[in-house]
Amino acid sequence: MARFPKPPEGSWTQHYPELGTAPVSYEDSIDPAFYEKERHAIFKRAWLNVGRVEQVPRKGSYFTKELKVANTSIIVVRTTSGEIKAFHNICRHHGNKLVWNDMPLEETSGVCRQFTCKYHAWRYDLDGNLTFVQQEGEFFDLDKSRYGLVAVHCEVWEGFIFVNFAKQPEQSLREFLGPMITDLEGYPFDKMTSRFTYRSEVKANWKLYMDAFQEFYHAPVLHANQSPTAYSKAAAEAGFEAPHYRIEGPHRLVSTSGVRAWEMADEMRKPIEDICRSGLFGPWDKPDLGEMPVGLNPAKCDPWGLDSFQLFPNFVLLFWGQGWYITYHYWPTSHNTHIFEGSAYFPQPRTPRERIAQELAAVSFKEYGLQDANTLEATQSMIESQVLDEFLLCDQEVLIRHLHKETAAWVEDYDRKKAGV
Ligand code: FES
Ligand SMILES: [Fe+2]
């Protein structure tokens, strides 16, 4: 259902008639029973991004990922042949968690030649084969070749490692991503190795934080104090509207125009921005990243601010016009809690000045993220009151409509298939 550019008349929402314009319920964000369904219908069926190839740079590099939403922990490893594989993090002997450090429930990473269980020292090679059993002769007809680690479907796209917990995924990763996302191929992800990450536990449903980053209606209001007063006042009065929205399959895109901060009047900038030549939009001195892929800046904004691609279910790829990108992950831990991970990626800085410009962009992003997160508990707690059961969404919030509708569609589809209809 791709429709762009913006229609000359009518609203974005009217051009996606299947979404309707009626008020919506957020029952899907407060109901523990619905969350249980989401876990099976969505998180055990969709492709989930768990990291990037740079996290497993050489043979034997691995990391673990705790995925409470799928009720498991996984190991992602680069095998001897250089392939990337994923396994459930469980020993075939007594079921001990195979890879962990001091704290069994915390994620870890490293490099090894094989995995050795801490309990009775069974060993597995990097391809997951069981290679050593302590006092093997004591077992009964043990055929080691039948007791390798349990594999998880794992595919890589543009260096992003995805897993799928379905017995047999319904689509390949590329099919699942679809053309709107695969049109990003060619972006120099592999060169963007200067990485800043944040992680936080949020007391709100995972979809509510996604919603906070898929509309900019809130920006001039919620982030008013982030900018010098003259700028904030002007922005709040003007309001904001993104020039482009697009919905395709389960995924969404919003694109916005940007600013040339260095050309703005002095009172519009903060002193630190002048000193560091950077700010929320990124370093003012834009790195040369070569030609951008066709999928970026679809409205041809000049200056272009950002494109935020919301990949179903819980992964966001946000590209800044100034030559850097951000990822968000929202990992549900219950119907009203989740873990948020935000990472900013830049090319390797060549000078201290470039490094400082990246740091200012990364901390500005964190500051905005904190402001966005700040309303989440306030919203979650009051939606849970159930005093109101329907809420209004404006045209700029069309992507929120889509996320909640898509979530419901996956749950309905799962229910239907389970019932055999
Ligand atoms: S549980 Fe792993 S070796 Fe016994
Ligand atoms: Fe925001």
Image (cartoon, rainbow, N blue to C red):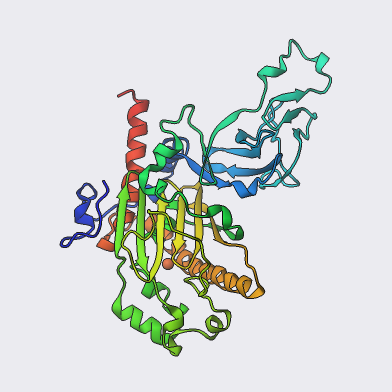
Q: Nearer the viewer, residue 107 or 37?
A: 107
Q: Residue at x 61, y 57 (%)?
A: 193
In the displayed structure, 268 sits above or below 368; it is below
Q: Residue at x 24, y 52 (%)?
A: 3
Q: Nearer the viewer, residue 86 or 155?
A: 155
Q: Nearer the viewer, residue 209 or 341?
A: 341
In the displayed structure, 169 sits above or below 228; it is above
x and y percentages locating residue 173 in the rendered image: 45, 38
In the displayed structure, 316 sits above or below 283; it is above
Q: Residue at x 39, y 49 (%)?
A: 183
In the displayed structure, 233 sits above or below 342; it is below
x and y percentages locating residue 22 in the rendered image: 21, 54
Quadrant where the C terminus is found in the figure: top left
Instruction: Indicate the quadrant of ligand 2 in the picture.
Output: bottom left
From the viewer's perspective, tell me whether residue 377 is left or right of residue 392.
Answer: right
Q: Is residue 394 visible?
A: no
Residue 394 falls in image quadrant: bottom left
| Outermost front residue | 290
x and y percentages locating residue 179 in the rendered image: 36, 45
Residue 58 falls in image quadrant: top right
Q: Is residue 333 visible?
A: yes
x and y percentages locating residue 15 in the rendered image: 20, 53
From the viewer's perspective, tell me whether residue 210 is left or right of residue 128.
Answer: left
| Outermost top residue | 141
Q: Nearer the viewer, residue 380 or 265?
A: 265
